[in-house]
Amino acid sequence: MGRTLLYEGKAKQIFETDEAGVLLHRYKDEATAFNARKRGSWAGKGRANAAISAAIFAYLERRGIPTHFIEQVDEVTLKTRRLQMLPVEVVVRNVAAGSLSRLLGYEEGRPLRAPIVELCYKNDALGDPMLNWYHFRELGLTDEELGFCEGLGLRVNAALRPFFGERGLELVDFKIEVGRDAEGRMMLADEISPDTCRLWDKKTGERLDKDRFRRDLGGVEEAYEEVLRRVTGGEDS
Ligand code: 5GP
């Protein structure tokens, strides 16, 4: 099958194939943080993230949440539906951490009264700022799109919090992206992995996600392997 590189991101390459409307997402071992000011890589990252994302997308599909995922084709590659992406990063939070702790002056680990949804403008040059609906309308997004993004974020959270909970992991927060297929249907896109979620061990509080890389905590490779083991080795609920 011929592959043409369409786009190379920080952690993934996206290829076009001869199959119309279908893309290949190849997960890389590279990691970046702080808008690519910090860079690194470790063996097995792409394999872990591809398998974790595939398992989570398949789970969400079974729960009736539309995603771009079609199938996993090799250790590091997922076949996906080709989408027109919305320039939005949807962040959902259950526990204060990261930028929310800075925003509200909350210590990390403080539980939130209810999940918080934030919509950020996907724009590296601007540092992915959090915007409100008025700003997004100015950028050309519709209320239908914004409502879908918020609703999807909450639905994914409602499905994944217990999914991770049963595997001994607290879903502290995560980021998802949304796109439209050729028929105009909006769905979940991009990836769901320890690169895009904060996952804390429920017993020890240990961070099993990209914060180990961002904050130089060590053991990042082992943390991703542990999430992979819990996500793919557990009960298939
Ligand atoms: P924060 O806003 O606290 O930095 O991030 C909140 C959550 O969204 C974290 O789980 C973080 O991993 C995820 N997130 C937000 N923006 C990005 C991004 O640009 N790239 C990735 N990989 N994750 C992000």
Image (spheres, grey):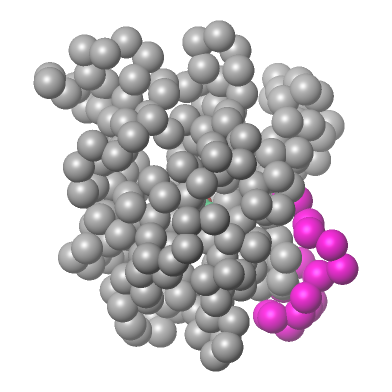
Residue 115 shown in magenta: yes
Whether residue 188 sits left or right of residue 78 in the image: it is: right
Question: Ligand 1 quadrant?
Answer: bottom right
Whether residue 4 sits left or right of residue 6 in the image: it is: left
Residue range highlighted in magenta: 101-119
Whether residue 84 sits left or right of residue 121 in the image: it is: left
Residue 163 horizontal/vertical position (percent): 58, 60
Residue depicted at x 78% and y 59%: 115
Residue 61 horizontal/vertical position (percent): 54, 37
Q: Give the number of callouts.
A: 0
Residue 140 horizontal/vertical position (percent): 70, 20
Q: Is residue 148 above or below residue 164?
A: above
In the picture as drawn, the residue positioned furthest to the left comes out as: 1
The quarter of the picture where residue 72 lies is top left
Residue depicted at x 65% and y 52%: 159
In the picture as drawn, the residue positioned furthest to the bottom comes out as: 204
Residue depicted at x 47% and y 30%: 68
The quarter of the picture where residue 224 lies is bottom left
Rendered-image quadrant of the N terminus: top left
Rendered-image quadrant of the C terminus: bottom right
- Camera-nearest residue between 28 and 187: 187
The quarter of the picture where residue 97 lies is bottom right
Residue 33 shown in magenta: no
Whether residue 82 is visible, yes or no, is yes
- Camera-nearest residue between 62 and 113: 62
Q: Is residue 3 above or below residue 111?
A: above
